[in-house]
Image (spheres, rainbow, N blue to C red):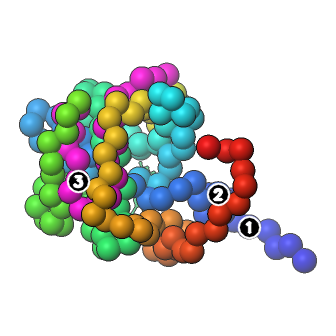
Amino acid sequence: MMQELALPDVYRFLEPGPVVLLTTAQNGKMNVMAMLWHMMVEFVPPRLACVVSNGDYSFAAMRAVGECVIAIPSVESASEVVAVGNVSGRDVDKFSAFGLTPVAAGRVSAPLIEECFANFECRVVDDSLVEAYGIFVLEVLAAWVDPEKENPKTLHHHGYGKFVVDGRSIHLKSKMP
Ligand SMILES: Cc1cc2nc3c(=O)[nH]c(=O)nc-3n(C[C@H](O)[C@H](O)[C@H](O)COP(=O)(O)O)c2cc1C
């Protein structure tokens, strides 16, 4: 027998992918936030959409500079991920407060994060949905992976502080690249 689900809990069942970190830089000041709501929208050039709330300090930098880095943390960084997602860069230098190491990017002003196993340098290519939904469409200009971080296990948010950690892999024949 089905039970009615509270509507605010719907998102927990459509978990879109790993929790990522989004870095920005504006007027020489770097910042980082946690981000869950993102989705790929194109293979080549790689494009993705993401939701950055207009209450976030990062929102202003995204609007003003139009650049960011999407950095993918593994489970080893779980407590830092939650920390940067629970305080604002308005009040705290989150890189030094939470021991994250910024690394200069090649194409954008926002920094890569050394502790993350993948870093994607992005430019905002469509902001027509920002006003209505907080959705920024990004194009990845350069992508980096750390070959020394083998078999990274990503974090997947299921709400209320519960995270699922990437599990075993299975390989099936599929036309999907
Ligand atoms: C696991 C997790 C996922 C989050 N996902 C998002 C998201 O997708 N979009 C968003 O706007 N905020 C998200 N947040 C909240 C921001 O990370 C949070 O408001 C942060 O403090 C904003 O930092 P800033 O003010 O320095 O930009 C998430 C937080 C956590 C802990």
Residue name at image x 38 percent, y 40 percent: 54
Residue name at image x 42 percent, y 23 percent: 125
| Lower sequence index among marks 2 and 1 | 1
| Mark 2 Cα shell of 10 Å, populated few (<14), some (14-19), many (≥20) | few
> CA–CA distance between discs 2 and 3?
27 Å
Q: Which amino acid lies under the numbered mark 1 shown in the image of this protein? A: Leu
Q: Which amino acid lies under the numbered mark 2 shown in the image of this protein? A: Leu
Check disc 2 and report the residue beneath it: 14
Ligand 1 sits in which quadrant? bottom left
- 66 is higher (above) or lower (below) than 1: above
Task: Specify start and end residues of the magenta stretch as a single range.
Answer: 108-128
Check disc 1 and report the residue beneath it: 5
Name the front one of labels 2 and 3.
Answer: 3
User: Residue extending furthest right?
Assistant: 1
Taking the image as drawn, is residue 33 in sight?
Answer: no
Q: Does residue 113 belong to the magenta stretch?
A: yes
Residue name at image x 23 percent, y 47 percent: 112
Residue name at image x 11 percent, y 32 percent: 27
Q: Is residue 89 left or right of residue 55?
A: left
Check disc 3 and report the residue beneath it: 113
User: Element under label 2?
Assistant: loop
- 25 is higher (above) or lower (below) than 35: above
Q: Is residue 91 left or right of residue 52?
A: left
Q: Does residue 97 belong to the magenta stretch?
A: no
> CA–CA distance between discs 2 and 1?
14 Å
User: Element under label 3?
Assistant: strand
Q: How many marks?
A: 3
| Lower sequence index among marks 3 and 1 | 1
Q: Residue 177's mark?
A: none
Q: Which amino acid lies under the numbered mark 3 shown in the image of this protein? A: Ile
**Viewer-nearest residue: 73 or 163:** 73
The quarter of the picture where the N terminus appears is bottom right
